[in-house]
Amino acid sequence: MLGRRFFACAFTLLALIVTPLSMAGAQDRVVPESSGQVKLSFAPIAHSAGPAVVNVYSTKTIKVSASPLMDDPFFQQFFGNNFPGMGQQRERHQQSLGSGVIVDPSGLIVTNNHVIADGDEVKVALADKREFECDVVLKDDQLDLAVLKIRVPKGELPTLELANSDELQVGDLVLAIGNPFGVGQTVTQGIVSALARSQVGISDYQFFIQTDAAINPGNSGGALVDMNGKLVGINTAIFTRGGGSNGIGFAIPSNMVKVFVDSAKRGGSTVELPWIGAELQPVTAEIAESLGLDRPSGVLVTSVVADSPAAAAGLDVGDLVTAVDGIEVSDPRVFNYRLATKGVGNTAKLTVNRSGSTIDLDVLLKPAPETTPRDQVTISARSPFQGATVANLSPAVASEAGISYRGQTGVVILSVDPRSAAARIGLSRGDIILTVNGSEVTGTAMLNDLLNADPLFWRVSIDRDGRILRMAFR
C-alpha cells in the first residue's frame, strides 16, 4: 500500500438492499428487467432513514504557548522559566464535524471515536433543525466507535434498528447519507463491493464492509441501512489518493456496533472484548504447503498462555483454526471479530484441524484479566521517556495497548504526549521497555527509580512488535 493513504473521514452511510434481507442465497436478488423497474426510487428509504442521521459537532479547547519555543526542553535548558513571556499561554479551539446515528429513543447516538476525539463539548443537529448537547457515554479507539447521549431530549427522536450485518452480500445496493464537506445532508448510491476486509489498517478489530457509494470527508460515524430500514453498519474511512472519494469506503458492521451499544446501555465505562489467551498468525501459501493443505485457509496457533481459556479448552500450538461457530476465518483480525461479536460470557465453538483430523473445541469467552496491578504512571522525569504514560504488562493492558500477550512481564507504553521528549525520539503506544542503562525494567516503580537517577548518558532498549530496538542518548 506504499504511496497510498487512508483518510478517516466524517461521513454517514445508509445502505439499502435491493430485496428484503434473508439467509437465502443470491437467487433471491434480482436485477431490473424493464425500464419501469429502472425508474424505481430509493426515496422512501432515504425519507425514513434520513431523520435518524445527525450531524455531530465536537469542540476541544487547548492551551498553547505564546511561542512554540516555550515548550521545547532544549530551549528551556538555557532560559528556564525566566525568559520574558515564558509560561504565557493562549486558548485555541479545535473543531471537528462528523455524523452519527440515533439508535435508541432515549437519545443514544453511535458515531466514530475519531469524530469526537477528546472534545470538551459535543453537540448534534438533527435533520429537523433541532440541536442538542451530548455527553460521551462510551468510546474506544481500538474499535473507533463512540456512543453519545443527548442530555435533555425534547420531543420524539427518530431511530434506526440494528440488523444482522452477516446477511449482507457483495452486490447489494447501498445509499450513503451524510454531510460531505459541510454542504448539508446528501444521498449517494452504490453497491457493497466487498465483505470481511481485514487488511485496511484502520482499527485493531478489522472486519469492514466495503462500498463504492461516494463517500467524502465530513461524514464519519454514519449508517448503513438495509431495504427494511435497519442499520447494517457504521462507516469509518475511505481509501483515497487525493483526499476525495475514489469509490472505496469502509463501514464497521452492525454486529460489532451492537456489542458496543449494548455495553453503553449497561452503563460500562469500557467495552469488554473476549480474550482467549492464544496468539494466531495467518496461513501463507508456504505454511499451507507444509501442512498439506491444497490452499491457504484458517489461522495457525503460535502460542497459548498457561491457565487461559484457550488452554482450558485444549487448544495447542500448531492447531489450525478454520472456523468459529461454523463461519470460516482466514485472518487473526477476522477471528477476533467473530469472538467480539459473540460476546464475553458466551462459548464459541472452534473448528480445529489437528494433524489432519478435524475436532471441535468449546472456548469460554472471558475478558482479558489484569493479572498484575497496572500501577499506571505518566513519566515526568527529565529522560527519553518524559511524556510517556506507562503501565505494568498484563493481558488486559496488552489488549489496551494493542499488542500480543505471550505471558511476558515488564512495562508497556500506553500513550505518548505528542509534544514530549518521548514523542521526539519516536516512542509510541505498544512499545515494551526492556532495559534502561543495562538494568532490566520489571515494573513502573523500578522504571521511575531508574529515570530519577538522571544520568549523563542514556542507553535504552525496547521491544516493538517483536523487534528489539536499542538507542543511546546524551
Image (cartoon, rainbow, N blue to C red):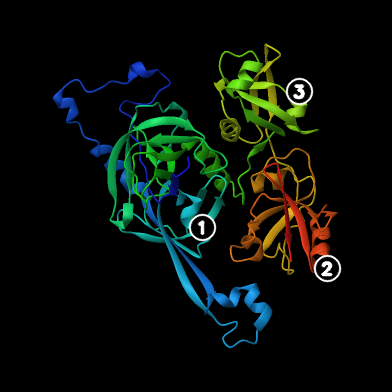
Q: Earlier in the sequence, mark 1 or mark 2?
A: 1
Residue 88 left/right relative to 401: left
**x, y percent for residue 287:** 63, 21
Crowding near pointer 3: few (<14 within 10 Å), some, many (20+)? few
Residue 189 left/right relative to 169: left
Q: What element carries label 1?
A: loop
- Tell me which amino acid carries mark 2: Ala
What numbered label is drawn on residue 453?
2
Image height of 18 relative to 177, above or below:
above
Q: Nearer the viewer, mark 1 or mark 2?
A: 2
Q: Residue at x 69, y 50 (%)?
A: 431
Q: How far apart are marks 3 and 2 (CA)?
A: 47 Å
Of 25 and 347, the residue lying toward us: 25
Q: Residue at x 59, y 30 (%)?
A: 335
Q: Quadrant of the C terminus?
A: bottom right
Image height of 74 relative to 385, above or below:
below
Q: Which residue lies furthest to the top in this view?
A: 357
Q: Distance between the residues labelled 1 and 3?
A: 41 Å
**x, y percent for residue 35:** 14, 25
- Tell me which amino acid carries mark 1: Ala
Q: Do the residues labelled 3 and 2 touch (CB within 8 Å)?
A: no
Q: Where is residue 49, by image quadrant?
A: top left
- The residue identified by callout 1 is 117
Q: Which residue lies furthest to the left in this view?
A: 35
Q: Do the residues labelled 1 and 2 touch (CB within 8 Å)?
A: no
Q: Which of marks 1 and 3 is nearer the N terminus?
A: 1
- The residue identified by callout 3 is 314
**x, y percent for residue 365:** 67, 33
Q: What element carries label 3?
A: loop
Q: Are marks 1 and 3 in contact (CB under 8 Å)?
A: no
